[in-house]
Amino acid sequence: MADQGSGRERWGSRTGFVMAAVGSAIGLGNVWRFPYICYQNGGGAFLIPFFFALFTCGFPLLMLEFAMGKRAQGGAPQAFHAIRPFMAWAGWLACLCAFVIVTYYCVIMAWSWDYVWYSIKMAWGTDAEGFFREHVLNLTSGPGILGVIQGPIVIGLILTWIAILAILWKGIRSVGRVVLVTVPLPALCLAVLAVRGLTLPGAVDGVTYYLQPDFVKLTDPRVWLAAYGQVLFSLSLGMAVLAAYASYLPRDADISNNAFMTGFANCGFSFFAGFAVFSALGFLAYQTGVPVQDVVESGPDLAFITYPTIISQLPFWAPFFGVVFFLMLLTLGIDSAFSLVEGFATPLRDTFGTKHIKVVIWLCIIGLAIGIIYVTRGGFYWLDIVDHHVSDYGLVTIALVECIVVGWIFGARRLRREMNETSEVKIGSWWDICIMAITPLVLGYFLISSLIKGIIEPYGDYPAWANWVGGWGMIILVIAISIFLGTKYHRKGVK
């Protein structure tokens, strides 16, 4: 790739950029969220709304964020500023939401570090749930009681932030080299787990539950909303990452083909992960003598309770497959984690002219300090509250604003023409329709319905004050900081 004489650092190769974008998109949710969502919403039939959402929301927004970053040659705030100066705040909102996410995402990775060690000894014994909740997390009775810091998790948290710092130390070129290892490695681990899972008794029953189509589900609007939600969150949209990565592309770089490769790689990994997960769940159901649907879990419970239980039941090499599983989680998580930090570091460096490594060091220190809250005995409750509100409201809002700003203020057709000038695959007017109508309508409905539900039914079983402090309070805080930074940036202008 040519440097174009701009003096801006560039990706060493197109492969490095695509692999980094794929690594950012493929994360923990591909393993513990997509298979469950697919099973819950019609099995094989869910692939119909999923691919419809991918082509009407996923690919259009991928192209939009790539194009905005490349066009501005800067991160999300610069990208919004280049379209309309007063909209820089939306870019800062994306950066701050992403940084909030990485502060607790690294804690989940810290659990994985600990479980690599626990797998060698099979430390959870016959009670994986009790071990996770009472030994690893050592939970208090609620978010109002933080309790002491959990030492082993702190060690894992420090290791995670050191890894992020080491990867980002030399800038985007080092990222391009690292992802050539960290992206294929979890796919290899997943393949090992899938092969082992499919050879276990009961595996066929599990896979059948995963893929058995229920076309009646397609008449339920909630299934289609679930598909859009999965696509939005899975591809790291609205997190400032993709614009930052694209800002290191030369101005003649391809957009549409890179977006298609990123989206298909992410979705292919998610689909394949279902075979590894549900074959293992089928084995667990066979071993315990209960129906498959009674052992299906998602999220942390799947990774740190259900899967360790499955590993304990394996007839041989149980510690080996335990280590493989949690190493897979670590390699999946690290690409997403350092991309979220880079998504914030890029615009900070571009705005204030500070050396990249200084920005990264400070972000790692601040992220580690904030993460200490989540490694207390009551930290899990706060992690859950913050994650729900930032993901369900913050990211959807950012994606909606992107559609409005590009589709109706800047002009979807205008940006599409710019993309087509340098892209191998020319996109048609369907992209305009998606950005101007389909995607914003779906996201708007998603956001409004979530807000109404959140106001009527407070999230979880947490006290109202906890939802206000960790949920709505966090949202209000990041919006206020974003507007402040956007105002200062607008007055200062682009460097």
Image: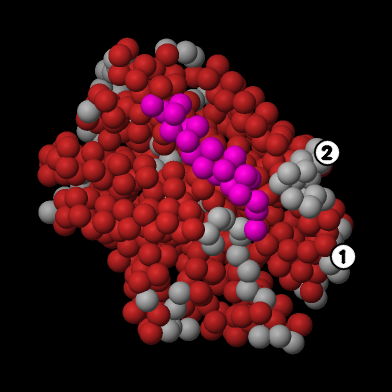
Residue 448 to residue 413: above or below: below
Residue 178 to residue 389: above or below: above
Give the residue type that dot 1 points to: Gly
Tell me if 128 is positioned left or right of 224 in this view.
right
Tell me if 444 is positioned left or right of 468 in this view.
left
Mark closest to the chain's N terminus, 1 or 2: 1
Dot label at residue 157: none
Residue visible at 41% across and 36% down?
94
Residue 148 to residue 10: above or below: below
- Residue bearing the label numbered 2: 148
Give the residue type that dot 2 points to: Val
Tell me if 275 is positioned left or right of 51 in this view.
right
Q: Which residues are magenta?
A: 461-483
Confirm whether residue 100 shows in the render.
Answer: yes
Residue visible at 45% across and 74% down?
41
- Residue bearing the label numbered 1: 125
Tell me if 158 is positioned left or right of 195 in this view.
right
Confirm whether residue 331 shows in the render.
Answer: no
The secondary element bearing badge 2 is classed as loop
Residue 479 among magenta residues: yes
The secondary element bearing badge 1 is classed as loop
